[in-house]
Amino acid sequence: MEITLLSILGLGFVLGIKHAIEPDHVIAVSTIASQSKKLMRSSLAGVFWGIGHTATLFIVGIVLILMKGEIPEKWAMSLEFLVGIMLVYLGVTTILSFKNIYLLKHEHDSEVHKHVHSHGHHSTHEHRNHHKQVSYLKSMFIGLVHGLAGSGAMIVLTMSTVNSAWEAAIYIMIFGAGTVIGMLVFTTIIGIPFVFSAKKFSLNKSLTQVTGVISTVFGIYYMYNLGVTEGLFKLWIQ
């Protein structure tokens, strides 16, 4: 492999790490990290986001590169707008999540007071495992949406740095590895205050709701900027 290609792939890895910490990415994943009671779960949320993000970029990117096509501006901006909708949804559900957490905590405490034996504890364990799986799938879905929204820019970036489809495939995978590692590090850092405040209900609630408000407000700003400032709404009605 040529030195120049190695340099390009190295740059792709660094750009992947940088890409992972863009505000909309960090805010979206922080809404999931805010509901994690263990640091490992926060870290894995970042990993699953990276997997979803890379999978979408790879599939859409390679198909368009092989077809020598590009995503029309209207569609590219509409996919970006979808990110704004998702941020608002994640923010609102995060703000409302403490009602569900309180109910689950109350149900769990009731089970303990009733001295429910093996079957009851097994059910609680199953519920927790199911919740973990849902959180990871949610993280992957968030990454998938971000991947769709960023696929147009990724194709332009890829084709400006490589000469063939196989080089493009390697570049996107290396870029994806960078985003996975970048998001792994940052979701771990983001998760620390939520994990340490897990047993302090009021503090944890405040931190979680602030995260939800930030996601909601940023999502509204994101949609306004795309729709009004960058002219997406005008493109829709043309």
Image (cartoon, rainbow, N blue to C red):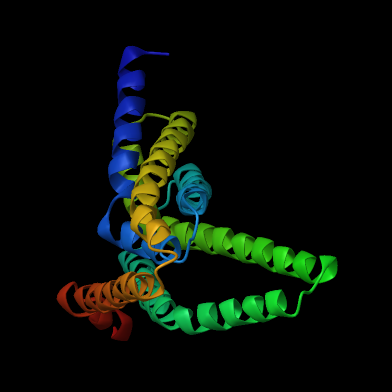
In this rendering, the answer to whether 164 lies above or below 5 is below
Q: Residue at x 34, y 49 (%)?
A: 189
Q: How many marks?
A: 0
Q: Is residue 11 left or right of residue 132?
A: left
Q: Residue 190 occupies which quadrant of the picture?
A: bottom left
Q: Position of residue 228 (x, y in %)?
A: 19, 80
In this rendering, the answer to whether 10 lies above or below 97 is above
Q: Quadrant of the N terminus?
A: top left
Q: Is residue 223 left or right of residue 92?
A: left
Q: Is residue 70 left or right of residue 173?
A: left
Q: Position of residue 166 (x, y in %)?
A: 49, 30
Q: Position of residue 101 (x, y in %)?
A: 52, 77
Q: Residue 181 occupies which quadrant of the picture?
A: top left
Taking depth in this image into account, of 160 and 38 the one nearest to the observer is 38
Taking depth in this image into account, of 194 and 153 the one nearest to the observer is 194
Q: Is residue 207 visible?
A: yes
In this rendering, the answer to whether 164 lies above or below 31 is above
Q: Residue at x 34, y 40 (%)?
A: 16
Q: Is residue 125 left or right of residue 63?
A: right
